Amino acid sequence: MMWQATVLTLYPELFPGPLDASILGRGAAEGYWALDTINIRDFSDNKYGSVDDTPAGGGAGLVMRADILGAAIDSAPRNDRPIVCLSPRGAPLTQARARTLSEGAGLIALCGRFEGIDERIFETRDIEEVSIGDFVLAGGEIAAMALIEACVRLIPGVLGSASSLGEESFDGGLLEYPQYTRPREFEGRAIPEVLLSGDHKKIAAWRREKRREITRTRRPDLLERFAKDGPIRRDKNKEPER
């Protein structure tokens, strides 16, 4: 079954955008995945196409209406796909979650705008809130693109070679080791000799150590978790475990 992403948005013209370029675009053209959009304004109940109203209790900004969003969400075929709302209050997006989503039928991404979304839509629909970082954007569209890209590149066949995914950042719980290529020397800095030695055992040991070193320096929280729980074990049919 083809992996299918449906995006509910006020700005369908933003899509596919970068999702149509490079390996992602090629993956879509070759039938590994597909994208469609639903314009939330199509479900407006007024001639102006508005989808929001002032917040109950007062306050700045406008809030997206639950009745209009409910109609838009219900129009999307579920096909066992989770509904994901991109929100700064959501659970942080992880490589493990992206991998699990990539192994399913796809996803339905809800992109909020304005001051927020009427809470009743979360109370009446099974919606997972996901955050791509501790910052606020004008809307959920860029976050939805990031989520979809994170999933699509993990679909078997999209990258061409499964080995390309083997030792990336977060794979096994650590950040990726440094990469080098030609020229052999650049502005007085040479490629580490071990990488030119042809000794695969030494190269593997060097890369393992560099992964730990970079993780220790840049993401000590990941290293602490790695030391406590060990590397992530992947099973193609299950959520990655530790």
Image (spheres, grey):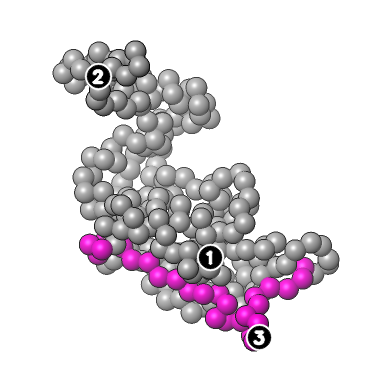
Which residue type does callout 1 highlight? Leu
Residue identified by numbered label 1: 110
For residue 46, the mark is: 3
For residue 184, the mark is: 2
From the image, state whether disc 3 or disc 1 is nearer to you.
Answer: 3
Judged from this view, the residue extending furthest toward the right is: 58
Residue plotted at (23% across, 53% down): 157
Pointer 2 and pointer 3: residues touching (CB < 8 Å)?
Answer: no
Residue plotted at (23% across, 44% down): 162
Judged from this view, the residue extending furthest toward the front is: 187
Q: Earlier in the sequence, mark 1 or mark 2?
A: 1
Which residue type does callout 2 highlight? Arg
Q: Position of residue 87 (x, y in %)?
A: 59, 56
Quarter of the image with the N terminus in it: bottom left
Alpha-carbon neighbours of circle 2 within 10 Å: few (<14), some, or many (≥20)?
few
Alpha-carbon neighbours of circle 1 within 10 Å: few (<14), some, or many (≥20)?
many
Judged from this view, the residue extending furthest toward the left is: 198
Residue 50, picture quadrant:
bottom right
Q: Position of residue 112 (x, y in %)?
A: 60, 63
